Image (tube, rainbow, N blue to C red):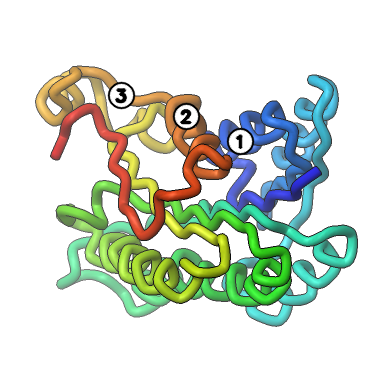
Amino acid sequence: MKRALVTGGSGAIGAAICRKLGADGLYVYVHANTAIARAEEVARAIVEAGGAASAISFDVANADATASAIRAMNAEGVIQIVVNNAGIHSDAVMAGMRHVQWANVLDVTLNGFFNVTQPLLMPMIGKRWGRIINVSSVSGLVGNRGQVNYSTAKSGLHGATKSLSLELASRGITVNAIAPGIIASPMSEPVFDKRAIDQLVPMRRAGTPAEVAELASFLASDRAAYISGQIISINGGMI
């Protein structure tokens, strides 16, 4: 049984990805930082549905804590699939943005990608099979007012995805990014009402976490063995 780690697995998109990977027959580590109770609920639901999962908590922005957690997980069996989904918003126009807002968003999204992924690489290379999936955003492709920090972090993931895919291409490991648009979730609902969605999205609806999870499931599978270094949008035709 292959093992997968999904960071930010307690959120709407992360939880959907966890459930789908669990249904695909993977052992899933459902990660959370502070929302460990929600991660435990997701893991419990996977197990009740006949899958295998457990919840784990650490701060992806803390390199030492992350490395320690990953060593413990790899001791149980090498993690061959990682979905870097952890990320935060701290929105403000840049003229009024505080340094802590800039730093925190980059720490979680971009430094968190490095902290989680780097210690997984040598064990994954040893298996000569792996899948690295980075969850980005349409904001990383086209930008968004009030999100210079978030857009910077997500577009940074795009460069990391492309460069890392070249380093790992001969080792049976693919590296791709998913760039969702407006996805229905408790975070997006207060920001995007029906009128805004109709104006922004040609399909005139928000996507669902399950739709994002289906894409992640495909990229994590053997069916996607020849896809690497790609930024794949899922946004209802926004761009």
Residue drawn at x 37%, y 53% as measured from the top left: 136
In the picture shown, does residue 117 fall above or below 145? below
Disc 1 target residue: 15
- In the displayed structure image, the side of residue 123 where residue 225 appears, left or right: left
Query: Where, by quadrant of the figure, is residue 116 drawn?
Result: bottom right
Whole-angstrom CA distance, mark 3 to mark 1, is 17 Å
The amino acid on which the numbered mark 3 sits, given as a three-letter code, is Ala
What secondary structure is found at the residue carrying circle 3? Answer: loop
**Quadrant location of the C terminus in the rendered image:** top left
- In the displayed structure image, the side of residue 100 where residue 196 appears, left or right: left
Q: Residue 41 carries which label?
A: none
The amino acid on which the numbered mark 1 sits, given as a three-letter code, is Ala
Whole-angstrom CA distance, mark 2 to mark 1, is 8 Å
Q: Which mark is residue 209?
A: 2
Are the residues at dot 2 and dot 1 in contact (C-beta closer than 8 Å)?
A: yes
Residue 153 in percent (x, y) is at 34, 67
Are the residues at dot 3 and dot 1 in contact (C-beta closer than 8 Å)?
A: no
Residue drawn at x 46%, y 76% as measured from the top left: 167
Residue drawn at x 13%, y 30% as measured from the top left: 200
What secondary structure is found at the residue carrying circle 2? Answer: helix
Q: Which mark is residue 206?
A: 3
Count of marks overlaid on the render: 3
Residue 99 in percent (x, y) is at 34, 79
What secondary structure is found at the residue carrying circle 1? Answer: helix
